[in-house]
Every structure is written in structure tokens, then in C-alpha cells.
Image (tube, grey):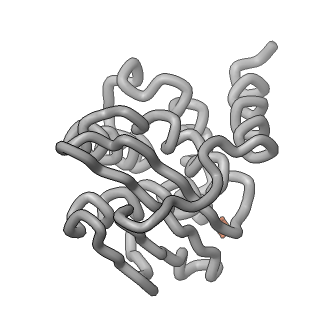
Amino acid sequence: MQLDDLYRQVIMDHYQHPRNRGTLDEGAISVDLRNPSCGDEIKLQLLVDGGVVKDVRFLGSGCSISMASASMMTEAIKGKPLEEAVQLAHTFRAMMRGEDVDLDQLGELEALQGVRKFPARIKCATLAWQALERAASAPEGGRVEDETFGD
Ligand code: FES
């Protein structure tokens, strides 16, 4: 199997069987973020306790890349210190900008690097990660709504 096919399979699996889809109860940090290019949205919720991401959920409407990226992100950060989750977001976004990054840190998230060939879709892949970075700078139990992001 070609590597591209493997990557495509990983992305489609997360799109068709999203992990951590849903909402969390009160006390979670909640971020609503819109991709200005297409209007698609994500709601990301994090339950942070003692600086650790105890739980994470997302809802959204968007293309396969945005929803797969969100699903993969939630799996990658659940149970991690928030600081590490933010570091991972920086590394992921650097990969999407074409920078040289340590791919070992990214695990199956590497599957999304092929999206770089389609610059218009890069925002799709980074939508959930931008939401994560905003969530990380919100106070615990905080809410960030109706945000859009740039590059
Ligand atoms: Fe809207 Fe991908 S086309 S997030």
C-alpha cells in the first residue's frame, strides 16, 4: 500500500468514526471557532484539572479534513498536560506550514501533512488546533465564542 493511501485511510477512519465527539458538562472550557474561508465551525470543550486535559470533546460541521483533524487532535491530547497539548499544537501547525519538525512527536497526525499540497485546505486541518490554543489561554470554565482566525 502506498503511504498516501495509508494516510487517506487514517483520515477517512477518523472522519467516519470520530473520537470524542459530543459535549462536556459545566466547568469545561468551551471554544467556538469558525474557519473564515468556508464558514465551517467547531466547538471544542476541554476539562482541565490540575493543568491536565482530563477530558475533551468536539462538535462541528465541516469537511472531512477538519473533522478528522479534530478527532485526531482529541485523541492526541487527552490525558496530557495542557502545556504539552499546546506544544503539540505548535508542532502540528509548524508541520502544516512546511517547517522541519520532529514527526515522531506527531504520531498518526503525520497523515495530515499531505494537505499542504492544497493550500486552501490548510485552514481546515488547523481549525481544531487553533481552537485548542484559544482554549488553553481561556480561564478554567471559560468560554470563547464566535471567533474566527487568520493564517
Ligand atoms: Fe470548511 Fe474544510 S471546507 S473546514
User: Viewed as shown, does residue 87 lie left or right of 126?
Assistant: left
Relative image position of residue 16 (x, y in whole percent)? 81, 44
Image quadrant for the N terminus?
top right
Task: Describe residue 34's horizontal placement relative to residue 38 as left or right.
Answer: left
Q: Residue at x 44, y 81 (%)?
A: 148
Residue in view at x 37 percent, y 33 percent: 79
Residue 94: give x, y in percent of width and height. 34, 45
Q: Quadrant of residue 50?
A: top left
Measured as percent of width and height from the top left, residue 42 is found at 56, 68
Q: Is residue 32 above or below residue 67?
A: below
**Residue 130 image-quadrant placement:** bottom left
Q: In this picture, is 29 found above or below 10?
A: below
Q: Residue at x 64, y 75 (%)?
A: 40
Q: Residue at x 32, y 33 (%)?
A: 80
Q: Quadrant of ligand 1?
A: bottom right
- Please determine whether, in this image, residue 14 is positioned above or below residue 66: above
